[in-house]
Image (tube, rainbow, N blue to C red):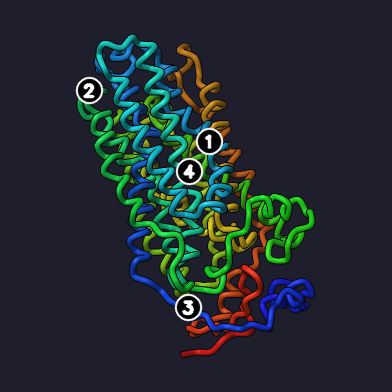
Amino acid sequence: MSISQTLNGGTPSPRIEKSIAPAVVEVKYRLYKRRFFGLFGFIILGMGSAMPGTWFGPIANSGNAQLTAADFDISLIQVNWLGNIMLCIYLPISIFVPVICSRYGIRRCTEVGGVMLLISAWVRYAGTINSLSPQSAYVLLILGQLFSGIAQPVFQVLGPMYSERWFNLNGRTTATMLIAIANPVGVAIGQLLSPLGTTRQSLLVLGIISTAAVPTVLLISDSPPSPPTYSGSKPPLPPSSLCRAALGLPVPQEAYMTPRERIDFLVVTLFFGAFVGASGAASVLSAEWFQPAGYPPVTVGLFGATSILAGIISAVIAAPLLDRVFTHSALVTLKILAPTLSLAWLSLIWAVRPNNIAVLFVIMVIIGMCSMTLLPVVLEHGVELTRNADGSASILWCSGNLFGIILILAEGALRAPSTANPPYHMHGALILQGCVVMVFGALVFILRVRQVRREMDETMMGNGNTALGTVAVAGSGVEHLGEGKTV
């Protein structure tokens, strides 16, 4: 069966058949060791660009008068906006990343992200000059955070596209996982390092780390000489084609989405946004959730560290299994992990109370394991539904940050007054977050995702054993014909 038949459920597509030219060449599917260097670059840059997002959070909650608000003579609300500004700028930038990438390629796009990361580090540090007025210093801090907000989505959105270009079926989910979890790992490292020393000293440390991370952009390349899979050989689709396909408008055959795929992608976008937004709210508001119940900052930090560590271990184990063993079980994985994660978030409504530390640690472990494992699975599902790696990742990550902004603002408004018992508790915020995650998490049960991209790759590669595919060259594009042969 040809690829056009695979896309259309067994019905040949006249549009594809007519576009095939008689010139036929053979393309050998290959893997290159240099793919790991680029993967390393994405991981380091992903961690480096994530650190500034919550860098001021632990400092802001410190009682040391020399830190943040007192040191710069600014209010706590202004300190909070040093983190919020990154979430806000993330939304438009994540939409433009695929546009830039489709025109200039992965390498050029990551170079822009690296330059933004470098500029952000030293503009932010320039705000620590003692001779500056509080207003001038705050402007430089905000600008530094703004540049960081431009850099961060570059290394998240392009992760699935890099995996598709450089990795085969046995490593694609694992590569996506490593790039995706670099962000929460960077957040965790930032939260650990930022309280060390004064604010000015910590910003110097952040500048040095960012500067050291930037050269790894040189390890990232656009695409290998020979593709690893059939889908890895296809030219990237423009972002506009995904938008038109999602709305049911006319598009080229390779960008077409069935009505069922459009519904599934909407569902995936909503529950991915809810889960990522809940995690983002937790990273910002965790101290305000737990401290009114009597848990000191050190314990709150251990909750977060335990969740991230459990998630990393879980994802590192699960992703290779999904790549190599449970290759067609991704949908089952979603329908198991999503309800489990939803119930874990909901259970915090009753678990956040005094002297309940053991239960809270168990819940945070479950949240970390399910969240980190779901990240690459959902991102890869987005590509399966759209056949547009950077476009789907852009929409998914944008949804996550949008949910995060909404939850942070709404939960902050639900903080109890000083006359409550205990004062300033966040029980209402936990109810809101638990309900939001439960409602959107339940949508996973209506998913019927078909792994079209994987089916195409397996067809062209002889179910994973073919190293040589036959292709036809037509104009500037390349169309694969038949299943190729094993060599």
Decide if residue 193 is on the left or right side of residue 363: left
SS of the residue at dot 1? helix
Is 394 or 60 nearer to us in this picture? 394
Which quadrant holds the N terminus?
Answer: bottom right
Residue 29: which disc?
3
Q: Position of residue 143 (x, y in %)?
A: 42, 25
The amino acid on which the numbered mark 1 sits, given as a three-letter code, is: Gly
The amino acid on which the numbered mark 2 sits, given as a three-letter code, is: Thr
Q: Residue at x 60, y 63 (%)?
A: 384
Residue 404: which disc?
1
Q: Which residue is drawn at 66% across and 74% down?
A: 474
Residue 153: which disc?
4
Q: Position of residue 338 (x, y in %)?
A: 55, 53
Is residue 84 positioned above or below 265 on the image? above
Is residue 131 positioned above or below 275 on the image? above
Is 231 or 335 nearer to us in this picture? 231
